[in-house]
Amino acid sequence: MSVQERKERERAGRERLIVATARELAEQQGWDAVTTRRLAERIEYSQPVLYSHFRGKREIIGAVALVGAAEMAAALRGATAVADGPRARVTALARAYLDFAEGNPAVYDAMFRLDGGLAFAREDTPEPLKDAFAALLESLGEVAGDGVRPGLFTEVFWAALHGLATLTRAGRLPPEDAGRRVELLVDRLAVV
């Protein structure tokens, strides 16, 4: 291994450490607790080292969002791969999405609530975000219905899931009806 390869590997390792530490701190104490000073202390590197990887908190949030998007895509695909038939796939997808949002609130915030400097629904959208949308589209496209663009249907279904995740987390929806909400969403929106 060359010196350059070793340095690149060490740099990538530091970057992963910064992202993982920011995520852990955000999950434990919220995003307000994530500061460059606290991150530098936790990872035991100086703030200038941290700034050599990320220009600030916004970029760190974006990096956490990209990791989260890849994890969400994997969770959605894993849930739908074992489901039999379109209805079961859509139901599994909806449950996996809501479970991901509930189990990873700080990551979900980084992906959809906070400004991580990422472009959505554009040519320059980062691949992990495109792939997370593709993971939704794979199951939802087949139930969009005649005359409905699969991408548009996926956007509407995703918006409904996001609303359910956000309102449930905020305590605006009673938790005992969570399963029925998924059933209703699948019954009323998906053509199965």
Image (cartoon, rainbow, N blue to C red):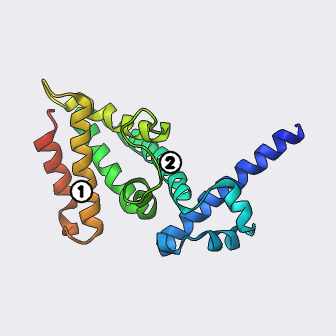
Q: Residue at x 33, y 31 (%)?
A: 138
What separation in Å lies between label 2 and label 1 (alpha carbons)? 21 Å
Give the residue type at disc 1. Answer: Gly
Point 17% across, 44% down: residue: 186
Tell me the residue at 74%/50% (across/down): 11
User: Could you tell me residue 171's position as x and y percent?
Assistant: 25, 72
Q: Which mark is residue 163?
A: 1
Task: Tell me if residue 85 can be seen.
Answer: no
Marks counted in the figure total 2
Per the rendering, the mark at residue 123 is none
What percent of the width, then of the height, locates residue 110?
Answer: 44, 58
**Quarter of the view holding residue 154:** top left
Label 1 secondary element: helix
Please tell me which residue lies in front, 142 or 149. 149
Query: Residue 106 in the image: x percent, y percent?
Result: 45, 64
Residue 69 in the image, given as x and y percentages of width and height: 45, 47
In this view of the protein, which residue sits in the foreground, 157 or 51? 51
Quadrant assignment for the C terminus: top left
Q: Quadrant of residue 149?
A: top left
Classify residue 56 by image quadrant. bottom right
Is residue 127 shown left or right of residue 142? right
Callout 2 amino acid:
Leu
Q: Residues within 10 Å of mark 2 (few under 14, many from 20)?
A: many
Residue identifier under label 2: 66
Q: How crowded is the residue under tag 1: few (<14 C-alpha within 10 Å), some, or many (20+)?
A: few
Name the secondary structure under disc 2.
helix
Which is nearer the N-term, disc 2 or disc 1?
2
Location of the N terminus by quadrant is top right
